[in-house]
Image (tube, helix red, strand yellow):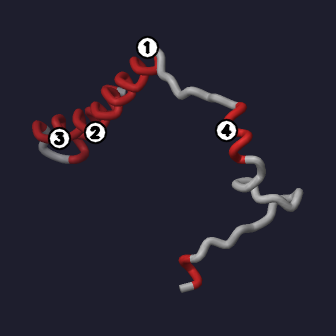
Amino acid sequence: MEFLTIKKRPQRDGYLMADHHNSELNETTSHRRQLNWFDAAMIVAGATIGAGIFMNPAESAKFLQSSSQLLFVWALGG
């Protein structure tokens, strides 16, 4: 089962990135992941628009007779 083994490849300087002072790096740098109100609002707006892209054509297709009518209404609406 050679495909399940992880082979470590040295980087340019001969050290592995995972082994090269990893503990020291984590202690000295602290990057906090945080979202502000603008980020949260953009996530909600993106989810709303994304859901609308898939829901609106399905609702329109229920009322139209053919796919050509759906394409016409879609092109008309922009």
Can you give x and y, in whole percent of width and height, for residue 43 in the image? 40, 26
Residue ranking furthest to the right:
13
Q: Where, quadrant-wise, is the C terminus in this rendering? A: top left
Can you give x and y, in whole percent of width and height, for residue 3 in the image? 57, 80
Give whichever of discs 2 and 3 has the lower sequence position: 2
- Judge depth for marks 3 and 4 and give the one in front: 4
Task: Name the residue: 11% across, 40% down.
Answer: 62
Which residue is at the front of the view, 18 or 43?
A: 18
- Residue on which the image places disc 4: 26
Q: Residues within 10 Å of mark 4 (few under 14, many from 20)?
A: few
Secondary structure state at the residue bearing disc 3? helix
**Mark 3 to mark 4 CA distance (whole Å):** 54 Å
Query: Which picture quadrant has residue 7?
Result: bottom right
- Residue on which the image places disc 3: 61
- Judge depth for marks 1 and 4 and give the one in front: 4
Quick check: 64 above or below 12? above
Question: As shown in the figure, which amino acid type bears the numbered disc 4?
Answer: Asn
Question: As shown in the figure, which amino acid type bears the numbered disc 1?
Answer: Trp
- Residue on which the image places disc 1: 37
Question: As shown in the figure, which amino acid type bears the numbered disc 3?
Answer: Ala
Give whichever of discs 1 and 2 has the lower sequence position: 1
Can you give x and y, in whole percent of width and height, for residue 22 in the image? 71, 47
Query: Which picture quadrant has residue 59?
Result: top left
Question: As shown in the figure, which amino acid type bears the numbered disc 2?
Answer: Phe
**Mark 3 to mark 1 CA distance (whole Å):** 36 Å
